[in-house]
Image (spheres, helix red, strand yellow):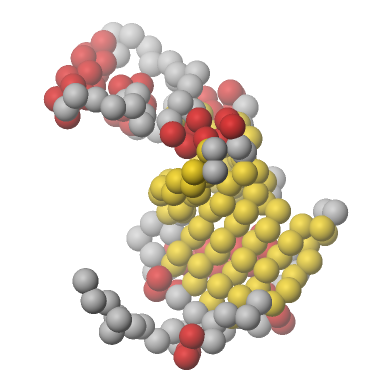
Amino acid sequence: MDLKDQRVDYNKFELLEDHAGNNPFDLFARWFEDAKQTEPEPNIMTISTADNNHPQTRIVLLKEVLNEEFIFYTNYLSAKGKALAHNPNISILFFWGQQQRQVRIDGTATKVSADMSDEYFYSRPVESQIGAIASTQSAPMKNREELDTKYQELTEFYKSNPIKRPEHWGGYAIKPHTFEFWQGRASRLHDRLVYTDQNGQWVRSRLYP
């Protein structure tokens, strides 16, 4: 594939210090509200983990920003869950193409409380609850029929039995230590502002594009 001529000129917005402010969470909230107007799923985020120096990247959904932590839910026995058990360092990325913006956040992940995981799990559609139980996430399976059969069997079982959240399914809270806000600009002279947590205070700096 020859993609050398695939280009988009970024010319919608700018990111200047006077507009950015000193708190990265405030700026993230403003950008997220903008993204909600143009992106079908603005809470899509890419997360990267590293286990034994082997990086892996995948898409998850942000479910909440609470107490200055970013919350998502998954199977703790999945590939990302196992990676985070060995190395809690994590990087997350939001890309909002219509806004010509991205936000990269580095931090550490810890499991949320069982009560918090319960609250979210039981708020999900019943079909999603059963799906979380049916899937041994990241483990190999023989074929699609194996999963579909298991799902149907569980669906019948839970028609007369209460559903219980599996202990290996729950949330992670990501505590950021670095934010980088990227705003596309013309001629590839993009704006990049970095916020770094230094002893509990956010320090802002600008990077060359």
Q: Is residue 86 left or right of residue 100?
A: right
Number of numbered markers: 0
Q: Is residue 65 left or right of residue 127?
A: right
The quarter of the image holding the C terminus is bottom right
Q: Residue furthest left?
A: 145
Q: Position of residue 169 (x, y in %)?
A: 47, 26
Q: Residue at x 58, y 30 (%)?
A: 85
Quarter of the N terminus within the rendering: bottom left
| 6 sits left or right of 62 in the view | left
x, y (%) of residue 139?
Answer: 33, 27
Give the residue at x 43% y 16%: 164
**Based on the displayed image, in which of its 4 quarters is residue 146 positioned?**
top left
Depth order, front residue of 164/182: 182
**Residue for point 43% across, 59% down:** 42
Point 38% across, 12% down: residue: 162
x, y (%) of residue 133?
Answer: 35, 21
